[in-house]
Amino acid sequence: MTVDASGPSAPPTAPEPMERTFTPDSVAAAVEENELEQIGVRPKLGTYLKELWGTRAFIQVLASSKAESENQSTYLGQVWSLISPIINASVYVLIFGFLLRIGREGIENTIAFIVVGVFMFRFFERSVMAGAHSLNKNMNLVRSVQFPRAVLPTAGVLAELLMLGPALVVMCVISYLSGFLPVAGKVTIDAYWLLLVPAVALMWIFSTGCAFMVARWVAMTPDLDNLLPHFMRILMYASGVIFSVDRYLSQFSWGWLMEYQPVAVYLYLVRSSILDEPSYPPDGFMWLLGAIWAVLFGVIGFLIFWSGEERYGRD
């Protein structure tokens, strides 16, 4: 008998499984095949718009709840949304209209002129600030639920629009009644008042675009939130809220820039709709400019916000 010098043979072992490697192409193919969604990746623009449209009911609920909760802890509640602009307008009318007499020349009804400017600029200012705070004040929601983040600034501006509705009624009543004072020009109710609706609609679209921009910028650099109130104050004086831009700034070579910048254009459209000011007649060019500004800022603002979609809540 012969014995194998190498000793007893070892039992055969199973072949080691080959490690499967994943490439970006294979992952993308698997995601597409199984209709999965990647987390932390900015969706395509078309998909994003579809998702945003699908959340329109959520936007309405969020906006209405925000509008209802405004000043809820105070005794007067929602009435403050009317009292605040009335107080602001009264102060500006008293100081700039009667004491300093700014805007008296060329303006027949200073009271209505300043009231309209203050009410409408307040809507724009609050819309921009709502956009600036839309992400930071809802960070728990951003980090816990998957939804298009554009919902938040959109709902914030829509809430301001809902609160603007009653304020517009008060603004029109004050403007009309001011026409019976001996120191103010008449304000007549005519068909031009119907133009107030498209003027406010254009300003709403423009304000939403601005809210998208500041929401992205404040999310990237929170310090900008502290600078926004100062910028808004400068913009108020540069937009003709208290005085006529055409009269006081046209003497400068750059005055036309202030006259045709978006906020001044929308103030012009609202004033030309409900006031009988010779300096503010209905102007087709201003309406065209208002439509251009609304589309331009609405589209660019949305694209700026969408470009940072994957970073919100993660930076």
Image: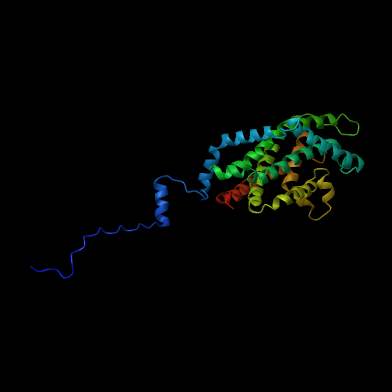
Hey, which residue is sitting farthest left in the picture? Answer: 1
| In the depicted structure, whether residue 117 falls above or below residue 177 | below
Residue at 85%, 39% in the rendered image = 91
Q: Is residue 30 left or right of residue 127?
A: left
Residue at 82%, 41% in the rendered image = 279
| In the depicted structure, whether residue 181 falls above or below residue 92 | above
| In the depicted structure, whether residue 79 falls above or below residue 103 | above
Hey, which residue is sitting farthest bottom in the picture? Answer: 5
| In the depicted structure, whether residue 143 falls above or below residue 163 | below
Q: Position of residue 16 (x, y in %)?
A: 29, 59
Q: Position of residue 164 (x, y in %)?
A: 72, 34
- In the rendered view of the protein, which quadrant contains the N terminus? bottom left
User: What's the colour scheme?
Assistant: rainbow
Q: Nearer the viewer, residue 10 or 42?
A: 10
Q: Position of residue 64 (x, y in %)?
A: 64, 33
Q: Nearer the viewer, residue 118 or 176?
A: 118
Q: Nearer the viewer, residue 73 or 142?
A: 73
Residue at 61%, 42% in the rendered image = 152
Q: Nearer the viewer, residue 35 or 210?
A: 35
Q: Position of residue 163 (x, y in %)?
A: 70, 34
Q: Is residue 109 visible?
A: no
Q: Is residue 55 visible?
A: yes
